[in-house]
Amino acid sequence: MRLIDSSVIVKFFSEEPGWDSLREYLYTPISIELSMMELASALLKKVRQNSFDEDTAIEVLDRYPSTFRFVEQKKSISKAFEIASKYDTSVYDAMFIAAAMKDGYELLTCDKHQAEVARKVGVKTLEL
């Protein structure tokens, strides 16, 4: 099973270049609740830059929680902190890595640095 990080989610839902190729990975999507906040923040930035419609963003955010299954993240925070500290990454990115590690999931990401860190800590990673 794969845990999907925010870079994939944002790319897909905001229809960034190459978004359609991600569809095959989203049949049984699993992520952490943090992804909802990261998606909302990314969409807000796009709306403010006039590159995404506000009504569409709201529709995406209303529909998103029911399309994903979320794994518990609160038990991964200390591990995420350790990973972020040791590998010079954000706690946000490290949360996805730690959650994938805890549950034995492969991490699906579009973020090269996050993929590198995940591999360093032994998390199987598919970088798109």
Image (cartoon, rainbow, N blue to C red):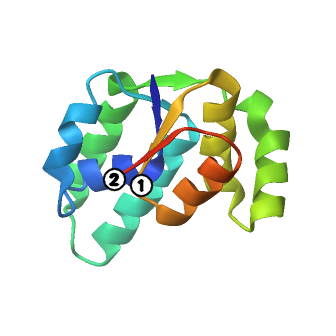
Q: How many residues crowd mark 2 within 10 Å: few (<14), some (14–19), many (20+)? A: some
Q: Residue visible at 35% across and 59% down?
A: 43
Q: Residue visible at 31% across and 69% down?
A: 46
Looking at this view, is 13 or 89 the one in front? 89
Q: Is residue 99 left or right of residue 125?
A: right
Residue 44 vertical placement versus 5 (above, below):
below
In the rendered image, residue 114, in percent from the top left (x then y), is placed at: 56, 58
In the rendered image, residue 21, in percent from the top left (x then y), is placed at: 17, 47
| Earlier sequence position, callout 2 versus callout 1 | 1
In the rendered image, residue 7, in percent from the top left (x then y), is placed at: 42, 55
- Residue type of the residue flagged with mark 2: Leu
Where residue 75 sits, quadrant-wise, is top right
Q: Is residue 102 left or right of residue 41?
A: right
Looking at this view, is 81 or 54 the one in front? 81
Q: Secondary structure at mark 1?
A: helix
Q: Residue visible at 33% across and 74% down?
A: 48
Residue situated furthest bottom in the rendering:
49
* Residue 25: mark in rendering: none
Disc 1: which residue: 7
Residue 113 vertical placement versus 117 (above, below):
below
In the rendered image, residue 125, in percent from the top left (x then y), is placed at: 49, 43
Q: Residue visible at 61% across and 54% down?
A: 93
Q: Quadrant of the N terminus?
A: top left
Q: Secondary structure at mark 2?
A: loop
Which mark's residue is nearer the viewer, 2 or 1? Answer: 2
Where residue 45 sits, quadrant-wise, is bottom left
Disc 2: which residue: 128
Q: How many residues crowd mark 1 within 10 Å: few (<14), some (14–19), many (20+)? A: some
- Residue type of the residue flagged with mark 1: Ser
